[in-house]
Every structure is written in C-alpha cells, then in structure tokens.
Image (spheres, coloured by chain):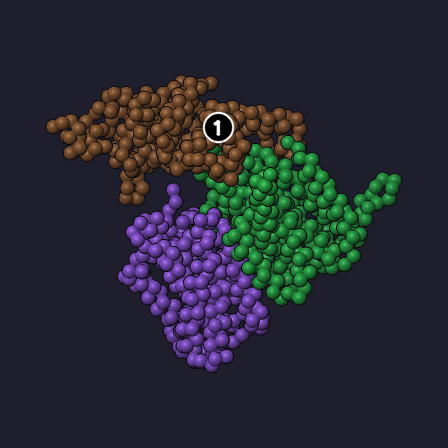
Amino acid sequence: MWRTPRSTLLVIGGLALAAAAPFIVTNGYLFHLLVMSAIWGILATSLNLVLGYTGLLSLAHGAFFGMGAYTSALLVEKWDWNFWATVPPAMAIAGLAGAVLGVLTLRLEGHYFAISTLSFGIVVSLVLEKWDDLTEGARGITSIPAPDAIPLFGLGQIRFDSDIAKYYLAVAVLAICLLFVWRLVHSPMGRALEAIRRNELLAACLGIDLVFYKLMAFSISAAMAGLAGVLYSVYITYLNPADAGFWNGFYAVMYIVIGGMGTFWGPLIGTLFLVTLPEFLRMFQEFRLLILGVLLIITITFLPDGIVGGAKLLWRRGTQFWATQK
Amino acid sequence: MVGSIYALIAMGVAMIYGVMNVPDFALGAKAMLGGYVAFFFTAILHQAYGVALAGSIVVLAVLGLGVERWIFRPLTKAPAINGFISAFGLLLVFENFALIAFGSTYRRILSPYDRQMIEIFGANLTMQRLLVVVIAIVLMVSLHIFIKYTTIGTAIRAVAQNRRGALLCGIHNERIAGVTMAIGSGLAGIAGALIGPIAMVYPTMGDGLIVKAFVITILGGMGSIFGAIVGGYILSLIEALGAMYISVDYKDAFAFAVLVLVLAVRPQGLFGRSQR
Amino acid sequence: MSFAGPLVELQAVTKVFGGLTAVRDVTLSVHRGEIVSVIGPNGSGKSTLFNLINGILASTSGEIRVFGRTTRGLGAHQVARLGVGRTFQTTQVFADKTVVDNAMVGRHLRVKTGLWAAQVRGNRFRNEEEQHRARCLQTLEVVGLREHAGRLAGQLPTALQQRVAIAMALAGEPELLLLDEPTGGLMEQEVMELMGLLRRIRALGITIMLIEHKMRLVRQVSDRIAVLNNGTMICEGVPDKVLNDQLVVEAYLGTAGAAAAYGD
C-alpha cells in the first residue's frame, strides 16, 4: 500500500526542493509566484477532488475560497481573534456552504449543477460587496496582520512576519492537503468517486450512494478551498469581494485541466506551470489570458488528461518502443 | 426590453443545447462580439445602423459555423463536461481578443434610433428600446416559423429529440449542428448589436448576459426555445420588480433566488423534458 | 438471517412512459435458488422490467418487493444494498481501469471502512483492503478472469468484458443477480462457457434472473421461463410447457409462421 521506492524518492526530492527554494530563487517576483502557486495549488487540489475525481464542474470554489479568506480576516480584524483560532471556523463555514449548496444542487444533471454553482458564486461576491457593515464592501479589508507567532516553550517563538515564513507555511499546508487527498483517493471512497465520474448509473447499481458521496466530496473540497483562502488573506494582506468571485475558481479549473484532470499531481503541476510561466514570457503579458484560453481548448480536446496524462502516455509509448527494440 | 435581450440569447442557448447537448457558455461573448461588429460597421466603415445589424448576424453566424466545426464537433464523443470547459476557453479567447483588438474603453454604437423618442402608453421611450423589442419579436416569430415549417427546421427538431433516430433517417447531424450553431450565434450577435447603443460595448459585457441566459434556460426548460423566451421576459420582470420593491443592490441575486426555487420545485423547468 | 420468501415479487406491475406502456400488469415471483429467464421479442419490456426491479425506474402502478421489502421510493443503490447485482445489455465496465480494480468497485457494498480510517491508515485498514482485494481475485477466479486481473478492462474482447461486468456484480456478494443478455455478441463456444458460469454462480447459492434470446441456453439452464410480449406476460412456467405454448410461438414467429411451424 505504501508508495514505491522510486516515488518516495521523488516526493522527498520535491519537498527538499521546496524547502530550499527561498534560497535558490533570488528574483523577488518569482518567489512571490511560488507562494501563490502553493496557495492556488491547494485550491486546485481541492477542486480536483470534485472535478477530476467525481466529475462535477463546480464554479463555486472561488466563492468558498473567498468565504474562508473573509472569515479569517474579519475574525482577526474586527474581533481580535488569534489567527490560528480562525482556521477551523473559516474551513467550517466554507465547508458548510459547500454542504448547503450541494444539498440544493447535487441531484441535478451536470450542466444544471455547473450553472447553479456559478450563480452561487456570483451571489456570494455580491453579498460580500453589498454588506458593507460587515465586510467593508468594495473597499476591502486592508492590512491583514501576519499569523500570530507560535511560542516554542523555552526556545523563543516562530514568527510569521516575513514572506519566507509565509511561504513555508503555505508549502506545509499544501503538503498536508496533498497527503490528505492522496489517502482519500486511495481508499474505498476514492474508488466510489472515480466510479461516479465514469458511469453514474453503473456506480449506483453497484450500491454507491451518489448523493452522499458527491456531497461528502463537495463539502470536503469546499473546506479545503476555504483553507487556501485563509492563507491567501494573510499573505496578500488585502482582501476585496473580487477575491471571492468567479475568476479564482475558474483559473483553478484551467490549471487542473491543463495539468491533468483526475490525476493526483495534475493540479499542482498545472498551477506551477501556468502561474510561473507568464513570468518567463513577459513580453506576451497582454496575450496571457488569450493563450490560456486557447491552451484550455486544445488540451480538453486533444489531451483530456493534461500534462500528467500526456507524460504517462509518452512514458508508456516509450517503454513499449523500448521493449520492441530488445 | 432587457427581457428581449435575455430572451434572444437564451433562445440561442436553448437551441444549441437541445440539438448539440452542449451548454454554449461562450454565447454571451458572441453577443459582445456582435456588438463590436456593429461598432466596427458604424464607427469605422461608416455604414448605416441597419447594415450594422445585418452584419452582426452574418459575421456571428459564420463564426458559429466555425466554432461548431472546430471546437465542438471534435468533442461529441467526450464526456459532457469537456464541451462546457471548452466553451469557457472560447469565452476567454473571445473576451481577450476583443480586449486586445479594441481596448477596454467602452465604445458607443451610434444608432439613429437612439436619439428619437416615442411615447407609448404615457411613457417616454427611445426608439432604440422599442426597436429592440420589435426586432426581438420579429426574430422569435421567424425562428418559430422556420423551425415549424421548413425542412431544415424539422430536421433540427428531429435531432433535438433523438440524435440516433435522426441519423437513421438520413439527417446529417453535423450539418444540422452547424446550422443550429449559426442561428444561435447569429441571434446572440444581433442581441449585442441591439443593446450596444443603449448599454455601450465593452469586452466583458457578455458575462452578465450569459449567466442570466443560462438561468433562464433552466427556468424555461433547457431544450425549450419557447421556454427560453418566456423565461427571459419573466426574469427581467422579476428583476425590475425586485429592484423597485425589495432592493436595487441585490438585483442580480434575484436570478439566483429564482434558480434555487425552480430547481427545488420543478427541475426540468416550465417547459422542459421530464427525466424520471 | 436469510430471507425465506420469494426474493422478487411483482404484483400487477405497470410502467407507462408518456404514450407508451412498456410493462403492463405483470405478476411474477422468483424464489431462492432458481434460475428464471425472461424472454420475448425485442421491445417487449424485458429490460424495463429489470430496471423496475433494481430501482432504476419507479413503477407507475403495482407493487414490487425485493427480499420482502417494497422498492417504491428506493434508489438503485438502495436496492443493490438489499443484495441485488445487475449487468446491462450494453456491457458497462470502467474501461480505463484494470479488471481487478473494476471488481474492487463492485466490492463497495461489502466495505465498512470510513473516511477517518482511510486517513489514519492503521493496520485494520490495510488488512481490510487486502481482504477485499483477495475476495475480488477469488471472484475473478469464479468468472474465469483471474489471469487477466491486471489488464485494462477496455482492452479485453467483448466476451471477456461481459465477464468483467458479471464479476463486478458478483463482487458485492449479492443473493440475486439480474443478467441482461449476457450472451450478446458471443459466439457458440463462448455461450457454452457462459452456461457453465451460470451453473457455477447458482452453485454458490445465488439466484439468477436472466434476459436471453438464445433458446438453447434458456432451455438448458432455466428452472422457469417468463415470456413477455408488448409488455404483458403471456406465459410462465417450466421450459417444456412454455416453449411449446401456442401463444409463445405466435409471439416470436407471428401467426402465419406459427401455422407453418405447426404444419397446418
């Protein structure tokens, strides 16, 4: 059940690289992109649970992301909560929103479901904008403080004021989320979700309760999206209703599709690739979204399993070819 | 009047969904492109507004043919979700193309009708608004006649009901898909050209429109054109009333409230096909 | 714990779709240990009947009981949980997954571990997963697919894919198995093999309902046969009685053909 020696090595290597990154990457903006990649990576991984594994196109994850961000930021700004204490409520609210939305919409056929999630997202950003008294509306929340320092008894404290500290925090959370998703996917529930994505009727006839599993996946995914939002709020230190809008969730969809829908590493790879690449192609900045759109269309049409899927295909072809050569 | 615009786009969505089983999320962006085409005709080619209207239909219809052929046809065997995602990609492409080509400044379409006022039942309207409603109704009626009484229209209905059956009857599903897409896109195009003089033309104008259009098609029943029309007017009525009596701020949220209600009570919409 | 009454009880079951009455007033019982075949011309409502029994469709009127419980209001997954497995006329498998993974999905009904256990990954979890996998391989043994366990289901020939579907249904350890035209597209030799498989399944104590067109198979394997024509059950009983029944012959061959067959 444990991973093969090769993949364990790869994972450790990846972690080491991630740990060393602040010292290797000297370009400030590129480093910023790495932090954002970690945060968006969490969002993408959460959405992949629903989109890639269960086959549901949710456009509400931007809203869950924003709800988590706002909950944490407001609790800290207005009620002086300790940052760490805000994480459970932020995730709970996002997860609850996911559950409620799920109950309302998961019995619906795919297209209806997608539109409903979209509408939900719009309403959430609308409420965040109009409910001035609570959320500061379009002005947004500014100067969000860094996470409170964690005392290490006798040895001082871990402070999170610096960007590097926030980077490590984001990467640590990402790693935990990835582990969680890995274990979930490689379990009976994971098998149920994958069955649902491929053939709902067959899954139902095999005893899989469609609504229950979709709801579970959706709620868990929403809570995780909220967590990503919390990290976003303390890193960027500024929030406005647009952050809870549709686009973040949609970008996540793109990262997932291009990285590899339904694969484990796809979302993260897609995120890393698409968030950092524009920096290297700075001259095409204007065309960025245009190219993204084209890439999305091409990927979904010709390579539905994305980069990871394509890599696996190449690997299989390569080994087959190699076998025939012997 | 707004209802007419919603209805036109919703009709396109309903038609395309009914025949191709793909929710074309890029239709709002096509409306936006229609607006820009009209702008191009009037402001740069200095043609009359009528020519601009015709141009918007034609250009978008041709674009629709291309989109069907190149974007959606390769995806007929793939899971439904892929078409949806592709439509999103298309939306990005269209919007950013418009952004790059025309910039983000709001553009004015000069229509002669915008200046003229007319009095109906004691209310003062610009001729443009009246024109929108009139043309929309003309289009709806023409479409209805087309679908009901022409060969192609019947073929469209056949494909919408049963793809395999239609194929067995010798109908070229692909050609029908192309025609449907062309009609739907043309409708969206003229919708954009019609609303242009009133609301101005800008790259993201399609976003709000398409979301409402989808809500409407759900309200009216996803494959039903008639439902889309009725739904369009109902929604605009609800929004207007809601803005007047409840709250102007949350105007856009009414669409969602309607959606939740419909989905909870009658998921197939007013005129849609039942599932179980 | 075993249910003693009829595993399936249909009482005056009718299903109407808009203008079409697919199933009309069908009354039928299936007892434990039997193999009951449902036959009839194309479009006579056989698959619809199966869909009604396993909860995919709700009947318009009439009563359906499975293991003594009424199926009204139950979804397909709930009926499956009662102990019903099913295959489809067009073979449904997860093409991009291995044969054994397909069976593992079918095993879902017997899985007890929850979300938390999956996260903690203690010994109990690992042991249970291993047990499930072992049982799946056993199931593959029964259907004769053991050597193909690691192959992708979609790459197998049709006959074997149908076996994968049967294995999936069996992996959940059902007491009742509904097989919809399992010999579809099979050649003579493969039909013989399937017959053997049906007998093996029956030997495991599983009751079978079968929709079939191949008369030789039906005659040799069935304890009872029910004949549907245009949604109505026109005859029911042991094979000898049913297959010689005038009405049945007419339904299949048409009246003129029946006359010819009876040499009038």
Q: Is residue B147 left or right of residue A160?
A: left
Q: In purple, which chain?
A: B
Up-down: is B198 above or below C127?
A: below
Q: Residue A116 placed where, x, y %?
A: 50, 51
The N terminus of chain A, quarter of image: top right
Q: As rendered, which of B91 and A85 lies closer to the eye? A: B91
Q: Dot 1: few (<14), some (14–19), or many (≥20) neighbours within 10 Å?
A: many
Q: Residue B201 placed where, x, y %?
A: 52, 71
Q: Which residue is mark 1?
A: C145
Up-down: is B40 above or below A61?
A: below
Q: Residue A225 placed where, x, y %?
A: 63, 48
Q: Residue at x 59, y 41 (%)?
A: A325
**Residue B234 visible in the current orientation:** no
Q: Residue at x 66, y 60 (%)?
A: A278
- Considering the numbered disc 1 on the image, is that residue within a helix, a strand or a loop? loop
Q: Is residue A80 left or right of residue C5?
A: right
Q: Residue at x 55, y 56 (%)?
A: A296
Q: Is residue A265 left or right of residue A163?
A: left
The C terminus of chain A, quarter of image: top right
Q: In green, which chain?
A: A
Q: As rendered, which of C242 and A243 lies closer to the eye? A: C242
Please tell me how many numbered marks the rendered image carries: 1
Which chain does tag 1 point to? C
Q: For residue C67, what is the image quadrant? A: top left
Chain C appears in which tint? brown
**Residue B163 visible in the current orientation:** yes
